[in-house]
Amino acid sequence: MKHEIPDTSLPTSGQIEREIDRVKLRRETRKAIWGAIRTLLVFAAAAVLISTLLLPVLQIQMGSMSPTLQDGEILIFETVGGINKGDIIAFRYDNQVLIKRVIATAGDKIDIAEDGTVNLNGERLIEPYVSQPDIGECTIELPLNVPRGQFFVMGDHRATSLDSRSVDIGLVSKEQIIGKVLLRIWPLNKFGIPR
């Protein structure tokens, strides 16, 4: 039986150079991968901060704003600027985020007839976004004067919306508001500002 004797000769300079190049390439690849990961993490953190502090992104979960907004639609909200009548806002209530339309602001007097017709400061409110007026769950005492720093909100689907007509929710304070709708980004065929 013949035994092979291991080659104990030294590597050639070409072999050494190829090994050095291989090790360098591996180091450079690792460095590039970690650099890309760090960059992605920075961008992800920035996106989370922006979406949390400046432009919250929310998905519609319930039908209380139909026909204006439908389940599954995704909206971007802006956190700066004033809130006006007609604005669609997101606000915190009882560990939830609700999305409703501002009907009355500080100094306004609101009244709702039995048929669901809304009167604002003694005049019937024209609401093209409501498909059918409805008194809904109205447990507040009307007429109501909206105090400073408060907002009276209602969903566009009046029969099912739980909103300022209920003593459970009542008026919404400025501190509860996350922001007002800036843009509908999903679905793409409805991209734009919902009215």
Image (cartoon, rainbow, N blue to C red):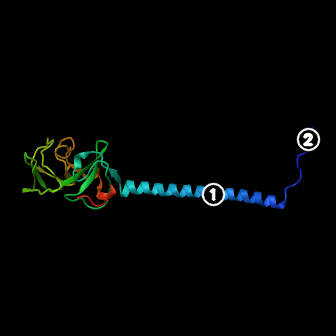
Residue shown at 28% from the left, 50% from the top: 91
Give the residue furthest to the front: 1
Q: What percent of the width, then of the height, locates residue 188? A: 33, 58
Q: Is residue 167 visible?
A: yes
Q: Nearer the viewer, residue 175 or 25?
A: 25
Camera-side residue: 169 or 86?
86
Q: Which of disc 2 and disc 1 is earlier in sequence? A: 2
Q: Compare residues 39 and 71 and report the one nearer the observer.
A: 71
Which element carries disc 1, helix, strand or loop?
Answer: helix
Indicate which disc residue 3 carries.
2
Mark in front: 1 vs 2: 2
CA separation, marks 1 and 2?
Answer: 45 Å
- Which mark is on residue 17? none
The crowding category of the residue bearing disc 2, from other C-alpha atoms within 10 Å (few below 14, some 14 to 19, many at least 20), is few
| Residue under label 1 | 31
Q: Is residue 120 left or right of residue 176?
A: left
Amino acid type, label 2:
His
How many numbered marks appear? 2
Residue 16: % across, % down? 80, 58
Would residue 91 be found to the left or right of residue 36 on screen? left
Could you say where residue 18 lies in the image, as x and y percent from the top left?
76, 59
